[in-house]
Image: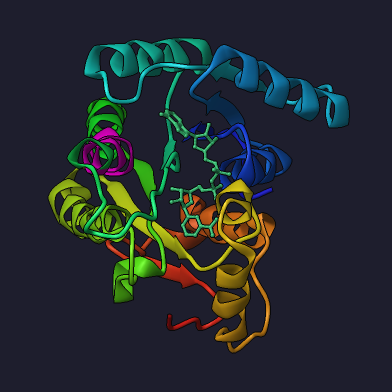
């Protein structure tokens, strides 16, 4: 079990990639705090996990990730409950597909708020705890579009390019505190985010993937498991693609 005795916070843990990460971390011995945007969806996810694994050491919280005080309060609670915080996974994210001509500035701000600002806020809260305890791991969720951009919905790729910058810079800044910082850049992965895209677009996207299919949330979670574990003890500042060699 790669994460025995480790404690983790996973944002956006109620479904999709985040839910797969929560399950993967629990299976590997971690204690996990699952964060979501609403009490109802958090409770639903916890019930699902407990049905499969009644002994799972998992708690749920729903702070506003854009509010530094609320985030710090929840992170302190997690530390108090588990005695420490070893791993933070910044996974919560949204996308919008509008063309530049129709893109509302408030929608652009919304995407940046969750996909970038909340990553900064959560990383800051976690790093303060991790520095005090002598180290930790921060993992961010980027995207394949952080490498190539995409032909519409410019806020989303812009936010993920920035997540890569944050990841590489934080790795350099926090290395001295024994905090490793990495990102996983998933390709097309079968979650609600992809189900919301027009079928034509999904077909076009998967047709150009050399492995010939979309990825599964569990395949992305495997990369998070590796980077969270001591197997990756000398890996920091890395953006790990899990995308079937997609180049869209
Ligand atoms: P999803 O829509 O299935 O899940 C998104 C998660 O984010 C949910 O748990 C939701 O509760 C949470 N969330 C949404 N708005 C929130 C808010 N305001 N506050 C707190 N939490 C909020 O998405 P997914 O496909 O699992 O995506 C997870 C991450 O992976 C995102 O960062 C996304 O950008 C990234 N990603 C996904 C794909 C893909 O193809 N699915 C590809 C590349 C990157």
Kindly identify the residue that appears in the image at 64 percent across and 85 percent down: 211
Kindly identify the residue that appears in the image at 45 percent across and 71 percent down: 241
- In the image, residue 12 sits, relative to residue 64, either above or below, namely below
Kindly identify the residue that appears in the image at 53 percent across and 17 percent down: 38
- In the image, residue 62 sits, relative to residue 212, either above or below, namely above
Name the side, left or right, on which 88 lies relative to 187: left
In the displayed orientation, state which residue is furthest to the front.
Answer: 102
Towards the viewer: 170 or 119: 119
Would you say residue 111 sits in the magenta stretch? yes
Res 27 quadrant in image? top right
Name the side, left or right, on which 232 lies relative to 206: left
Q: How is the image coloured?
A: rainbow
Name the side, left or right, on which 168 lies relative to 54: left
- In the image, residue 192 sits, relative to residue 77, either above or below, namely below
Towards the viewer: 27 or 241: 241
Which quadrant is the C terminus positioned in? bottom left
Tell me how many marks there are.
0
Q: Position of residue 197 (x, y in %)?
A: 56, 57
Towards the viewer: 33 or 4: 33
Task: Specify start and end residues of the magenta stretch as a single range.
Answer: 108-118
Q: Position of residue 245 (x, y in %)?
A: 51, 83
**Magenta-drawn stretch, dominant element (helix, strand or loop):** helix
Res 39 quadrant in image? top right
Would you say residue 126 sits in the magenta stretch? no
Q: Position of residue 202 (x, y in %)?
A: 59, 69
- In the image, residue 46 sits, relative to residue 227, either above or below, namely above
Kindly identify the residue that appears in the image at 57 percent across and 84 percent down: 209
Q: Position of residue 193 (x, y in %)?
A: 55, 50
């Amino acid at each position: 079990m790669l994460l025995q005795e480790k404690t983790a916070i996973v944002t956006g843990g109620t479904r999709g990639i985040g839910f797969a990460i929560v399950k993967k971390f629990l299976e590997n011995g971690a204690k996990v705090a699952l964060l979501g945007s609403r009490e109802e969806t958090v409770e639903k996810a916890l019930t699902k996990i407990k049905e499969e694994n009644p002994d799972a050491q998992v708690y749920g919280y729903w702070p506003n990730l854009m509010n530094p005080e609320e985030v710090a309060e929840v992170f302190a609670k997690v530390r108090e409950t588990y005695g420490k915080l070893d791993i933070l996974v910044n996974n919560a994210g949204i996308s919008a597909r509008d063309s530049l001509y129709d893109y509302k500035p408030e929608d652009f701000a919304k995407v940046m708020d969750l996909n970038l600002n909340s990553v900064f806020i959560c990383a800051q809260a976690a790093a303060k705890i991790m520095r005090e305890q002598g180290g930790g791991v921060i993992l961010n969720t980027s995207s394949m579009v952080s490498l190539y951009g995409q032909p519409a919905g410019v806020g989303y790729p812009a936010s993920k390019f920035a997540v890569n910058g944050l990841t590489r810079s934080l790795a350099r800044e926090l290395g001295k505190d024994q905090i490793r910082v990495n990102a996983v850049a998933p390709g097309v992965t079968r979650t609600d985010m992809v189900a919301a895209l027009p079928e034509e677009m999904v077909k076009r996207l998967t047709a150009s993937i050399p492995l010939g299919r979309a990825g599964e949330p569990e395949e992305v979670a495997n990369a998070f498991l590796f980077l969270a574990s001591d197997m990756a003890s000398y890996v920091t500042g890395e953006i790990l693609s899990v995308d079937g060699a997609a180049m869209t």
